[in-house]
Image: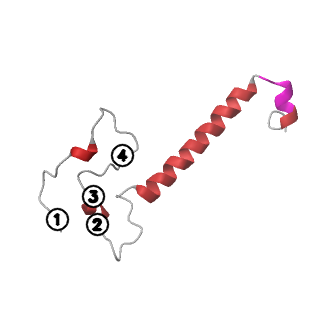
Amino acid sequence: MQGLSLKSLRSHYALVPLFVSVVGGAVFAAFYVGRLALKNPDAAWDRKNNPHPWTRIKPDQNIKFYAPGGIDFKNLKANGPDMK
């Protein structure tokens, strides 16, 4: 198929940035979805042993992928009751 082979990309240099950005976006999307499935406390994979994983998050634990504002999670204190 024209445009999808290495030989075709050599003759059409303008398509190289397009393919790089599409592949980069697909890799980032796959990484982010995988991280959400494995690290997010809202995803409960083992409901028998830990039915409510979001109650075990400590106040000094950062669970966000990107935390704007420069929040220092190491110095945060719990402002709610202990749910144990």
Q: How is the rendered protein coloured?
A: secondary structure
Q: Earlier in the sequence, mark 4 or mark 1?
A: 4
Residue located farthest toward the bottom when viewing the structure as drawn:
48
Question: Magenta stretch containing residue 1, yes or no?
Answer: no
Q: Within 10 angstroms of label 2, few (less than 14), some, or many (20 or more) residues?
A: some
Answer with the quarter of the image where residue 50 lies: bottom left
Q: Are marks 2 and 1 in contact (CB under 8 Å)?
A: no
Q: Residue at x 40, y 44 (%)?
A: 65
Magenta residues span 8-13
Q: Within 10 angstroms of label 4, few (less than 14), some, or many (20 or more) residues?
A: few
Real-space Cα distance between discs 2 and 1? 11 Å
Judging by the rendered image, the residue that carries numbered circle 4 is: 64
Judging by the rendered image, the residue that carries numbered circle 2 is: 52
Judging by the rendered image, the residue that carries numbered circle 3 is: 57
15 lies above or below 84 = above
Q: Earlier in the sequence, mark 3 or mark 2?
A: 2
Judging by the rendered image, the residue that carries numbered circle 1 is: 83
